[in-house]
Amino acid sequence: MAVLIKNIKKLVQAETAPIPFRAGSEMSNLPCIDDAYLLVVGEKIHDFGKMSDFSEKMLEKIGEPVEVVDATGRMVFPAFCDSHSHIVYAGSREIEYIDKIKGLSYEEIAKRGGGILNSVDRLRAASEDELFADAWNRLEEVASFGTGAIEIKSGYGLDTENELKMLRVIRRLKEKSPLTIKANFLGAHAVPREFIGRQTEYVDLIINEMIPMVAAEELADYVDVFCDRGFFTPEDTERILMQGIKYGLQPKIHANELDYSGGIQVGVKYNARSVDHIEYTGDEEIEALLGSETMPTILPGAAFFLGMVYAPARKMIEAGLPVAMAGDYNPGSCPSGNMQFVLSMGCIKYGMIPEEAINATTINSAYAMGVEDILGTITKGKLANFFITKPISTIEFMPYAYGSNKVATVYLKGKKVVDNGQVELN
């Protein structure tokens, strides 16, 4: 069945020609159409434009039933693309949250056996079915806030058996969910307890055993490394990325969350699709990113939850860089997958104007997860991933009203999956 959304107050991010991303001053450009229509046929966007240009004859040519939705007073946005998440995990870590309140740092909690290694213990004890059920609930949650595409990382297994278990769960989510999902192998998330003091041996295990097995089962699109102080060195990162590339996995990097680590430069050197976190980004890092194909990706929720410094988004944009923003939904440093909140944080804490923040959470984050050709904008031929808002006054209201869900209805691949808070992904 086709779908016609008519009388749209404002159709946001309406592009007549595909673009890979927006950078620098172009990030303030957000093409919109007032009093618009959007026509979906099958899984894809068939047509859009002003209501004054719409004709019923367009529907006659389709040759199939058409569901008509009146969006008077409402806006239509492309669904958010969340290019960084860790939603396959077992159990929460709110006790560490109390430790944070009492003043312990991220690194201090990790040294006490908390942090990532806490999640490793829980994940190793969980079954694949348990992990799938929990992750499915989180997919329903993020979809209710308007997310239509998400990258999911492994990294809580930290041995071959459990990393593969995580990636198989992600594959099941891909196969069943209408969300567009990318899988990321993050075996280098931390050094597991059994390898503490023998980090090089763990890197060898990732290179010689994990990556070949991940590739053999075609379980991942990306290979990732936590390149930062107290985790993996630039030298470790280069070794892992080179092996990943050899096996057909494109690099991505957790970089510069805790310090100036050299991770951004390594990411650029190996043509990483994105470098993520990047709280510590200076002139050298900006210079390395300029002219590269690597997307700087900020994770506002983690910086907010951990009380960290905020990445210099304004400086990066003014230097001519693109910026993406993603959710980082995980049990330790960002227990939220609400991309509306990420959008608001872009304005409140990073000094972005709403147009820039919307670009950062749609087309630029689509690029960061490698789906810019099919998602991120309202463009003919792209997948029909979009949401209809509740009645709102302006696009500025989206980041302004940071505490409420402004999404009424979500369509993914042309099918309604969220309707007034009721989620049905099947």
Image (cartoon, rainbow, N blue to C red):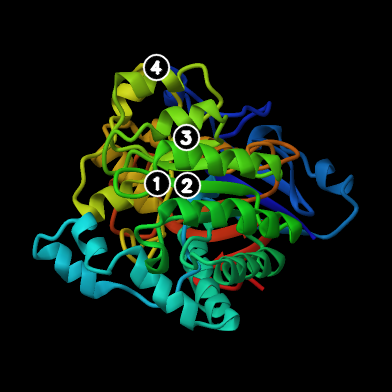
Measuring from the top left, give residue 136's x and y in whole percent. 55, 73
Q: Is residue 401 left or right of residue 56?
A: left
Does label 2 or label 1 sit earlier along the sequence? Answer: 2
Amino acid carrying mark 2 in the image: Val
Does label 2 or label 3 sit earlier along the sequence? Answer: 2
Identify which residue is drawn at 53% across, 53% down: 388
Amino acid carrying mark 4 in the image: Glu
Mark toward the viewer: 2 or 1: 1
Res. 232 mark: 1
Identify which residue is drawn at 37% across, 67% down: 193
Q: Is residue 244 above or below residue 127?
A: above
Mark toward the viewer: 4 or 1: 1
Q: Read off the residue under disc 2.
A: 225
Residues at discs 3 and 1 in contact (Cβ within 8 Å)? no
Does label 4 or label 3 sit earlier along the sequence? Answer: 4
Would residue 371 be seen by someone viewing this image from the given angle? no
Does label 2 or label 4 sit earlier along the sequence? Answer: 2
Res. 359 mark: 3
